[in-house]
Amino acid sequence: MLLPHIAARLYGTPLLLARSKLDVILAVLGDRVGWPEPQSALPMPLVKSAPLDAPMGIAVIPIYGTLVRRAIGLEAASGLTSYGEIAAMIETAVNDPSINGILLEVDSPGGEAGGMFELARQIRAADAVKPIWAIASDSAFSAAYALACSASRLYVTETAGVGSIGVIAMHVDQSVRDAQAGYRYTAITAGDQKNDFSPHEPLDAEAASRLKAEVDRLYGMFVDHVATMQGLEPRFIRSTQAGLYFGADAVNAGLADAEGSFTQAIQDFAAFLGTAETPLQLNQRPFALSHSSTQEIKAMADEVITTEQPSADPKPESEQIQTHPDGADGANESAKLIPESTPDTDAAVKSAIAATRADAVAIAELCQLAGQPQRIASFLANGTSETEVRKALLASRAEGQEIQSHLHPDAVSQAASTDHNPLMKAVKKLTGKE
């Protein structure tokens, strides 16, 4: 069975994919997309099962295999994972009150450019709501690295690799093969560029130039994204020349934050979240993604990030791991990041958390009643008190213009109820008040 729709997503379009993996895909799908297979290729790896040793309160989200915008039902057969599926799992974990943190376990060579940057921004936005860490186990290349570095902390195992920060596009000229088979294709088009990248004729210089321009544009976006997420200079990212970095080399280059096993990452994350003594649980079921709630999370997180993290480095200083040549000093510094727990400090922390959650719910309800739910995020990010919020809302109401309603007479009004407001739902789920 030929799969022309797959061919269209492999050739003549930029990919954020490790070159070796592209050869594997072509070897598996060559006959099915109607093009020759590379002579040296390895079998396509199977998608692994997600690990089962995550403490309760930590959702482990698997990012395995080749990444695509839409998997079109080929996940199990071809090792594809869609960006939409990943986004749905993240959103489910963010909205689950039993989940305190999210760990992305990445084992992927990368994939399509389409949809990748949107998901990367969603990951960073969701991290402003609940901590998101990631681990490359054992590969996070190209598009997969773009997702992994969007987490607030990135681990690599000692054998894992990251990088391949580059873009690749391929064109196959099968005109000689067509002639040998007795075929000659003639395209009748309107528009000089309509037949660009046709496999049935050689790629002309102008079409190649246009494709190269798009590759360069996406490369610039990729470089800027990684530089922002990792707090590195764009010129350094470009100097990697899409190279691969493994284990400690990835940490020393600044492309990862720590080297450690999956178990070590889980333990560190659990200690960070204060859930090290809890039973085991895994949250990995995909759910339908709500477009509106994703946009709301992104908008809220953008305001939080802008307010609380004005520096170029998006990773908080308390979360950065300093590496040292001898390794010993680095371990001591890392240990200092986690304070010792005592009954008094635990009680104080729990009391502070409860008070903060109560204030958050009160502020959210005030904004909802005032008809200004879009201000919830900024108030929470700025640490505005409930009294100050009341004053601000009253002042804006006094200065505001008269509101005119254009609702149809038969429409059902829901403005007076907080049950239908997705921001209120998110706040209540986050604070356990639902």
Image (cartoon, rainbow, N blue to C red):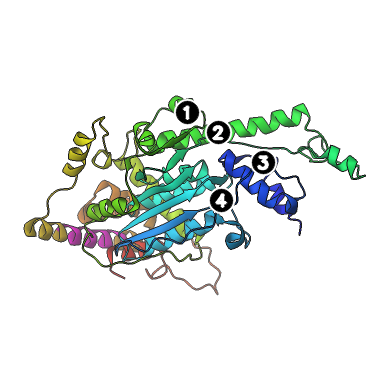
Q: Secondary structure at mark 1?
A: loop
316 relative position to 421: left or right: left
Distance from disc 1 to disc 3, alpha carbons, whole Å, reads: 23 Å
Q: Secondary structure at mark 3?
A: loop
- Location of the C terminus (image quadrant): bottom left
Q: Residue at x 14, y 60 (%)?
A: 351
Residue 248 position within the rendered picture, expressed as x and y whole percent measured from the top left = 35, 36
The label on residue 13 is 3
| Residue named by callout 4 | 66
C-alpha gap between disc 2 and disc 1:
13 Å
Which sits in the foreground, 136 or 369?
136
Q: Which mark is in front, 2 or 1?
A: 1
Q: Is residue 247 above or below residue 57?
A: above
Instruction: Choose the circle earlier in sequence order: 2 or 1.
Output: 2
Image vertical order of residue 195 relative to residue 420, above or below: above
Query: Horizontal and vertical percent for residue 24?
Result: 62, 46
Do labels 1 and 3 touch, CB within 8 Å?
Answer: no
Q: Residue furthest right?
A: 182
Calculate the distance from the C-alpha at mark 4 to the C-alpha at mark 1: 22 Å
Residue labelled with disc 1 = 240
Name the kind of residue labelled 1 in the image. Thr
Q: List x then y, in percent, for residue 93.
A: 39, 61
Q: Inspect the magenta stretch and tell me whether residue 374 lies in it.
A: no
**Crowding near the residue tagged with mark 3, few <14, some 14–19, many ≥20 C-alpha atoms within 10 Å:** some
Rendered location of residue 3, percent (x, y): 73, 55
